[in-house]
Image (spheres, rainbow, N blue to C red):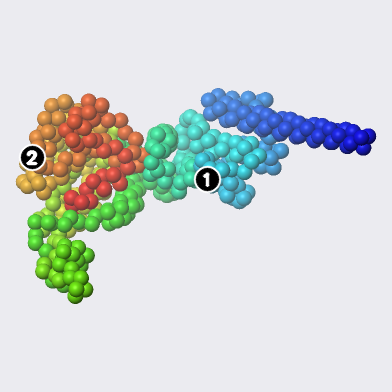
Amino acid sequence: MSDLTDNETAYEADNEADNEAAYEAAYEADAGQSAGMTRRQVLYWRLLSRLFVPDEQAALETASVAIVDDLGLPPALLDPGVSVDTLVQRFPELGVELQDLMVEKEHEAGDEVRRAALVSKLLLNVFSTGGGNVTAAQLERWKQDAAWFEKGMGCEPGGLRHSPGDEEVAAVLANIEGDLVKRMHLREVLADPALARQLTPSMSLIEQLLHDKHNLSGVALANAKALIRKFVDEVAEVLRTQVEKTSVGVIDRSVPPKRVFRNLDIERTIWKNLTNWSPEDQRLYVDRLYYKQTARRTTPARLIVVVDQSGSMVDAMVNCTILASIFAGLPKVDVHLIAYDTRALDLTPWVHDPFEVLLRTTLGGGTDGTAAMALARPKISDPRNTVMVWISDFYDNRSLINDFEAVHRSGVKFIPVGSVNSSGYQSVDSWYRQKLKDLGTPVISGHIRKLVFELKNFLT
């Protein structure tokens, strides 16, 4: 009995010791989590302070330096004057950590504070752009930092604005870049070949060049045209690939299939003749052959692209001008291009060269779609073989809806587009959006791939 009592006492003691150890471990874990949360809060408060308050907060800076040092990270991580590219060149191992940093996925336990420090670096360098004048070098450095931010979001550099669901973030980046371009003395930069070579074309830069092209001359104008040409060629290459992938042509089912062996539809022939199967002979007797229809459209399809060239639609103007030129190069597609603000301009003679089209546009001013419709409607000769793409934010004369209804009723495939920009983010007049939806022609808003998809089975 005594031995049993001693064993029970020893068991209770061991059990109590285990419970105390478990409690202490849990307490230490909670304390560790609490400390980690506090350190993350310090880093994020320091980030917010640097984003919204010009002056440094000494306490937050000191605490952040201590945290970064404890993590074994370089102090340059906290310096917004050091680009992410420079940081990665000095410490290559950080490049791997920054990739997919902000993607929703399983991360290793205990690395939350380290991730907070790295995220803070990306956010600070991209979203804290200060004030005052901007040099060409500063603009290019910001673009490189933005590319690292996109990598952190799980995208290729420049790919964030092509990712569904990230339209608002992409729009914010575009706005920041646009502000940097406006704060740069662009004319002086363009007049200096060495500075001009530092610029890489982007939508924000092209927008500013198109607005300012009438005030440029000589070397500055030549450099501006070179940047526009380079941007047009780069975008055209991307869009041409998308068109080639999706443009498959339309089968013309009004044309009887040619009764030749290569067009024989074996599966359909067997299926249609199954009633002629003879169990006794174990044979299928075929009394009719079926052939595949392969005839394509023989009449050239007419594509009429109407683009609002007011200041808010520059992105759509550039993209659709390039897209129209690509379709104009396809066989059996007759493309017409009209741009308008308060007046309309028929740009069809230059539709094959988007560079020349952009140089002939005048961005800004009001909007009067009725002027564009007066040019577009006479171009409709065969409604059933015509598609009209109308790109605008639709803040326009309300009477224009009557023209849209008439065009749609005539048999024309009418495609209203609210945005075909790089971010897919665009404001569209809610009245027109509802009216066009009721008409059965809802407004497309999003990346230009949506427009290519809509056109692929109608054209070529």
Rendered location of residue 439, percent (x, y): 16, 33
Q: Quadrant of residue 289?
A: bottom left
In-image side of 12 versus 447 (left or right):
right
Q: Residue at x 52, y 45 (%)?
A: 100
Q: Residue at x 23, y 51 (%)?
A: 456
The mark nearer the N terminus, 1 or 2, is: 1
Rendered location of residue 303, percent (x, y): 16, 47
In-image side of 409 versus 113 (left or right):
left
- Say which residue label 2 marks: 410
Q: Give the residue type that dot 1 points to.
A: Asp
The CA distance from mark 1 to mark 2 is: 51 Å
Q: Judge whether 3 appears above or below 261 on screen.
A: above
Image quadrant in which the C terminus is located: bottom left
Q: Residue at x 57, y 49 (%)?
A: 95
Kindly check if marks 1 and 2 are in contact, taking CB atoms under 8 A apart as contact.
Answer: no
- Say which residue label 1 marks: 100
Rendered location of residue 414, percent (x, y): 16, 40
